[in-house]
Image (cartoon, helix red, strand yellow):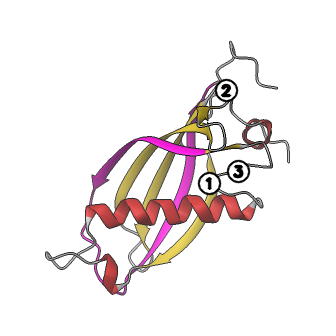
Amino acid sequence: MLDPTINLVMQAKEKIFQTEVLIQVSDINYGGHLGNDRFLSVAQEVRVRWLRSHGWSEKDIDSSGAGFLVTEAHLEYHEEVFLGQTLVCKLLVGKCSKCSCELHYDFFEKESQKKVSTIYTKIAFFNYSTRKISKTPDAIVNLLRGIK
């Protein structure tokens, strides 16, 4: 169990997952490029893939009853993204505490390897049954400490 006085910290340079996402027509806005609202959906897709790679879901991590609730999001654009491009996303972790975690998403265009965006989300752990904030699940703590 995570001691509430301990702040588990990993530097954002520590990759925990990587995946590729193909940009589809529904992702493109009136400006002809990936829209900011859709970029958050792409980040969610990456997050869901990461959780599924461990057999978890956004609503229940390792049968703990705790799921993810995004409480903050920040997008930083570096390059436009267009229909048909494939993005490589490196998911990284920032600080985790008693009941929250920071996730960082670095997006690169696959062919050119140019960084196109950085997204930051703050996640609160939330029990969807009780509708209350939960402690950081032990499975997340163990994963971040390198215990599989």
Location of residue 73 in the rendering, given as x and y in whole percent from the top left corner: 38, 45
Location of residue 142 in the rendering, given as x and y in whole percent from the top left corner: 80, 38
Depicted 29 relative to depicted 119: above or below: below
Q: CA distance from mark 1 to mark 2?
A: 21 Å
The amino acid marked with disc number 2 is Leu
Q: CA distance from mark 2 to mark 3?
A: 21 Å
Location of residue 64 in the rendering, given as x and y in whole percent from the top left corner: 78, 42
**Quadrant position of residue 13:** top right
Depicted 119 relative to depicted 140: above or below: below
> 6 and 29: which one is in front?
29
Marked residue nearer the N-terminal end (1 or 2): 2
- Inspect the magenta stretch and tell me whether residue 74 lies in it: yes
**Quadrant position of residue 137:** top right
Q: Which residue is depicted at the point 66% across and 31% down? A: 134
Location of residue 115 in the rendering, given as x and y in whole percent from the top left corner: 37, 62
Residue at the disc numbered 3:
60
The amino acid marked with disc number 3 is Asp
Specify start and end residues of the magenta stretch as a single range: 68-97
Residue 58: image tag: 1
Left or right of 123: which side holds 42?
left
Residue at the disc numbered 2:
8
- Disc 2 crowd rating (10 Å Cα; few below 14, some 14-19, many 20+) is some
> 68 and 148: which one is in front?
68
